[in-house]
Amino acid sequence: MPKFEGMQPQDYGVLYDRFKASVSRYDCGKYCAPLNNGEPVCCTTSHAIPIMDKTEFKLLETRSDLWHKFKITNAADRDLLSDMHKSCMAAECKGPAHCERDNRSFACRAFPFYPYITKEDKVVGLATYWTFEDRCWLMSNMQVVEADFIKEFIIAYEMVFEKDSYERKVMREQSANHRRRFSRLNRIIPLIGREGGFFKVMPNSHGEIRPARIEEFKKQGPFGSERAYQKAIKEAGGTAIERSPLV
Ligand code: SF4
Ligand code: SF4
């Protein structure tokens, strides 16, 4: 019997059953959408093209017509997707107005977090895809992340890592890259611990991790203050929302 490396379609079915929790009780898309033509940033392919395993797409195709293959229409996207692993593909959903909660991809469920892996190869918690920090409200408000989400996120990734060593390698590299980049900027990496709680990876410290207070996680870009946020919405031509998003 050949041994298949990687997640198979049925594995994604199990993963979807285990990873259903909402990241927070807030509908965070409401808070980033006014800065992005009314659509949540992570649901817009001009910001983030969803990449998934071909096997995940295979499963989704049997469950729904929500997803289709992403069509490359410009050189920038071609360039962006050029080094994608051969087991992966770029996909696109029909958009937030048609979202089906049960048929969200693994990437949709996990965003904006990735599993942070230390130099010693330990999965210690959740870090963010920091390049979105100027557009993702949640990254500036990590206190809203629910305990169930953290638990299910870790369970899901441990399942993936057990079956797919390549994915673990990718996340190790992502973590190393995060350390290098933030050391250069002399910034801490904000972390949510795998059992909850806040931590920080110290810059230029070979990855030393210390407990942190949420106040140490600096709010970024337009999320720095109510005034900056409302100003950014105005500049983006968006509709201001009534309640302050800065919880
Ligand atoms: S995770 Fe971030 S980018 Fe996605 S909807 Fe929430 S605030 Fe917006
Ligand atoms: S499936 Fe839903 S959560 Fe995922 S990108 Fe589409 S609209 Fe967003």
Image (cartoon, rainbow, N blue to C red):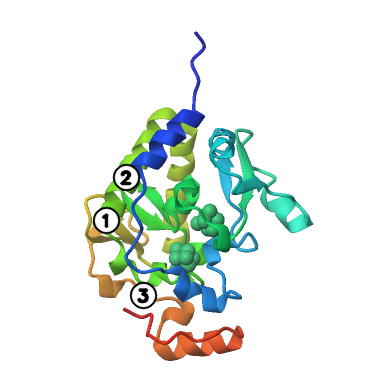
Q: Quadrant of the C terminus?
A: bottom left
Q: Amino acid at mark 2?
A: Ile
Q: Residue at x 29, y 58 (%)?
A: 192
Q: Is residue 204 left or right of residue 29?
A: left
Disc 3 crowd, CA 10 A, few/some/many (<14, 14-19, 20+): some
Report how far apart the C-alphas of labels 2 and 1 lie in the structure: 18 Å
**Disc 3 secondary structure class:** loop
Report how far apart the C-alphas of labels 2 and 3 lie in the structure: 24 Å
**Disc 1 secondary structure class:** strand
Q: Is residue 208 above or below residue 134?
A: above
Q: Amino acid at mark 1?
A: Ile
Which circle, 2 or 1, is nearer the viewer? 2
Residue for badge 1? 209
Which numbered disc covers residue 154?
A: 2
- Give the mark nearer the N terminus: 2 vs 1: 2
Q: Are marks 2 and 3 in contact (CB under 8 Å)?
A: no
Q: Is residue 129 above or below residue 13?
A: below
Q: Is mark 3 within 8 Å of ligand 1?
A: no
Q: Are marks 1 and 3 in contact (CB under 8 Å)?
A: no
Q: Is residue 14 above or below residue 76?
A: above
Residue for badge 3? 218
**Disc 2 secondary structure class:** helix
Q: Looking at the picture, how far across and down is residue 245, in whole percent? A: 38, 80
- Give the mark nearer the N terminus: 1 vs 3: 1
Q: Is residue 188 above or below residue 93?
A: below
Q: Residue at x 27, y 75 (%)?
A: 215
Q: Is mark 1 within 8 Å of ligand 1?
A: no
Which circle, 1 or 3, is nearer the viewer? 3
Q: Is residue 212 left or right of residue 36?
A: left
Disc 2 crowd, CA 10 A, few/some/many (<14, 14-19, 20+): many
Q: Looking at the picture, how far across and down is residue 87, in whole percent? A: 60, 33
Q: Looking at the picture, how far across and down is residue 66, in whole percent? A: 59, 49
